[in-house]
Image: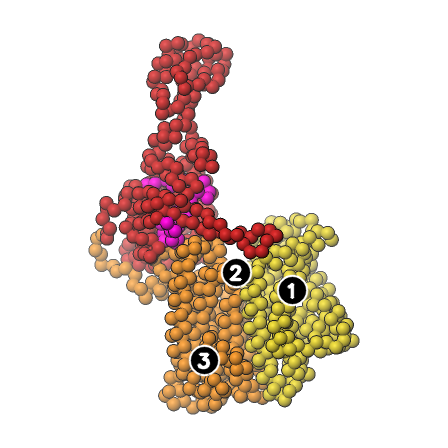
Chain colours: A red, B orange, C yellow
Amino acid sequence: MSTPEDVPAISLQDLSREYVVRTRRPGRLGRTRGVVRAVDGITLDVAAGESVGFVGANGAGKSTTIKMMTGILQPTGGGLRVLGRSPVPERRQLAREVGVVFGQRSQLWWDLPLRDSYGILAAMHRLTPAQHESRLARLVVGLDLSGFLDRPVRQLSLGQRMRGELAAALLHSPRLVILDEPTIGLDMVSKEGLRRFLRQDRAERGTTLFLTTHDMTDVERLCDRLVVVNSGTVAYDGALDGFREALGAPRELVVDLAEPRREISVPDGVTVMAVEADGIRHRIQFNGGEHKVPALLAHIGAQAEIADLTLGEPAIEDLVREIYARGR
Amino acid sequence: MAESTDRPVSLPRMVATLYGSRIRSQASFRTSFVADVLGQVLIVGTEFLELWVILAQVGVLGGMDLTQVAVVYGLGALAFGTADLFFGEIDGLSNLVRSGKLETLLVRPVPVLLQLSSLDLSLRRIGPIGVGLAMYVTALNLSGFAPGPAELLLAVVAPLAGAAVFGALLTMAGAMQFWLVDGREFANAFTYGGNYVATTPGAVFSLPLRAFFTFVIPATLVAYTPTLALLDLPGPALLPQWSGWLGLPAAAVLWLVAALLWRAGVRRYTGAGG
Amino acid sequence: MLAHGRIIAASFRQYSTYRMATAAGVFTNTVFGFIRASIMFAAIAAAGGELGGYTALQAATYVWLGQALLAPVEAFGTREVSQRVHQGDVAVDLLRPIGFLSLYYAQKLGRAGFLVLGRGIPPLVVGALVTGLALPEDPRSYLLGAVSVLLAITVAFMADMMLNLAAFWVIETRGLSVVYLAVMNLLSGFLIPIVWFPDWLLGIARATPFPSMIQTPIDTLSGRVPPAEALPLVGTQLVWVLALASGASLMLRAGQRRLEVQGG
């Protein structure tokens, strides 16, 4: 390959994109000109082989960022390199090494059998017949396409079509795979199927994966790194595991005591939210960054015997939603 | 990567695959396809009927009799039909821009223009091509075409040059939609309007109109002036007989402009974000 | 009736927002007007100043009125209803409290109302300035002409509906519309006045509703056919409206039954 492995797969430096929006106000001639910053200074390095979940609300700047990364859109500020290339001027060269799925837009040929779409794409990517055949065989097995390979795309179900779309994006064995909402509208089984194959394919080929989604399970299953964007800026960038702690989201500890007790004392900063079942069950909320569970348990255990306990983790969805709320 | 005996798809082979896929898919809707082709033939036929009705009344139109007009019409229809076959769907660019479908074409390693031309190829347009060709050849024979080598060459080159002229015009019409997404119909004045002019004896047009459709949109150079040269007829003001040979240079200039305009259009799209 | 009035107004407003498309359409209509007028002038000059009852000025009027009527009459046809039939959306339309044909007719009237003003008037103005227009001597021609234009719009609408409703039985109506377009182009008198046709073709044209869409409103409005003689032509339009409306509603009923039997 032309670019060495230590070059980051994706490198965004203070990347910005403004749109000029003209709106007509009622009762007035002419239009007013406004500038909207869809992406507002994103800096991000993705190493080759990494897998990043790029998450944000609608309008947070995800699609705009992907358009800039694939050379469809020129940034208005900052710079970026993808696989060592400058996307807009080197759009077509980049396309040989990148596979893209736009979840809402089909890249397949509507009235042709699914198989023919791969024939056309293989020709476009100038694959050798052997490359084409072996790769397609792999994709047919991995994504379970064999049942509808000869059916026109317009007759496929959404789940079948999305599998077909993913195969289309992976046919030329791209080093970087960019998926924009790949699981949107799919049922649980189809989603799991897609995820399983993406993990396999990444394990086999060491592909870099960049994924936007509204489904946090996609991120948990597929990504080792989470980037949350909000209002065009990076609101969180780090490991998925550290996300909850970094956010300081409250965790919930529920203890059931052996003997009922009207109240228990807790350290400063920890609150008892509720006492239930006549003093048996106590719901306690605490900050995971400040307090550790063993210390907390020791503190309570010194006052009463603990019969049972559950530890509640806030759902990632709730946390991401909280970030959006803060940004507003 | 392991070196193997099999070779990557060659460029001509790729282009053939792209066009071929389209041809197969359209042949699959047979009945509707036949009706479509017949309809296209009928349109070309009825438009000629207009000229025929007039000539049945007046005998000579723009200095040409019925068979001579038929040469012009056949040649013009053949040229436009060929261009329309390959570039007709570029006119639908505004739909691709609006639906965002253009983005999926931009992330492929093949020029967008080639993708649009091959993947939206409309085979029904072979109807007008067939009618145009038949009319061109028949009318040439009927009007006592006695070619020397130069005339024979012109008879073959003229439809190709004309197709290139219209191909460039259709490409420009598409490129224009990068700026005027709702202004698709503007371009019709030059593309379909150009076709109308090309299939008509150029002498009928007033001087300003004739000048416009020669120097700006070179429609009179597609069929009318080549017919003057082929049949050794005198030309009207602005259009001497020898201008029948100007189709090819006009096409070259037009394609240069079209290519620049298309490139600027794609640049505008990637700059403005659609 | 109130609902229809609202639909007409909404459709008018909707089309009035497509400014760029309107400007583009006017421009193209006007360029085509110049090309067509050139051919007619050459023909009339070759015939010695008059051809089939048309002087140069009358021919120019004929061309510009034709260009003006093209957009409101929508003689080239629409495809919306056939697409709704194919996609099954027509079932939703049939459930509305307002009749299917009257719903689409109201939309068509609103649209046509805007198109007469936005796309019809400008080419006429250009024509009046550049080639001149032959205006009617009898003021009653304007009144009768307005009625004739409304009827022409209605005839074209009903014929177009029948074509679209064929989608209940034909999988792909494209071919059908192309054939319709070709026949309409010639027999309506859009390309050249039908009185220029040889007798056999004139006979065929007169047996179809097509002249009622373009030739009749042009002749009536321009006063080339005086009001007394235009009256029977307008009557013919009315007959075609009734005939095609019955045809369209029969097709709609049959199609509806087909939907109920096959479940869409």
Residue depth check, mark 2 versus mark 3: number of the one nearer the observer: 2
Which residue sits at x=46%, y=64%?
B176
What percent of the width, then of the height, locates residue B254? 41, 73
Which residue sits at x=42%, y=54%?
B103
Q: Chain of mark 3?
A: B
Measure the C-alpha gap from mark 2 to mark 1. 19 Å
Asked whether, in this view, residue B29 is left or right of residue B118, the answer is right
What percent of the width, then of the height, locates residue A148? 42, 50
Residue C117 marker: 1
Q: Sequence-wise, which precedes: disc 2 or disc 3?
A: 2
The residue tagged with tag 2: helix, strand or loop? loop
Residue B55 vertical position relative to residue C98 in the rendered view, above or below:
below
The residue tagged with tag 3: helix, strand or loop? helix
Residue B59 vertical position relative to residue C33 in the rendered view, above or below:
below
Judge whether residue A73 is colored magenta: yes
Q: Chain of mark 2?
A: B
What percent of the width, then of the height, locates residue B112? 39, 61
Please give the range of residues in magenta. Answer: A51-77
The residue tagged with tag 1: helix, strand or loop? helix
Which residue sits at x=48%, y=15%?
A275
What percent of the width, then of the height, locates residue A189? 42, 39
Measure the C-alpha gap from mark 2 to mark 3. 30 Å
Asked if residue B141 shows in the view, the reply is no
**Residue B49: quarter of image:** bottom right
Q: Would you call the spot at circle 2 few (<14 residues within 10 Å), some (14-19), or many (20 or more)? A: some
Residue at the spot of label 3: B221
Which residue sits at x=34%, y=43%?
A43
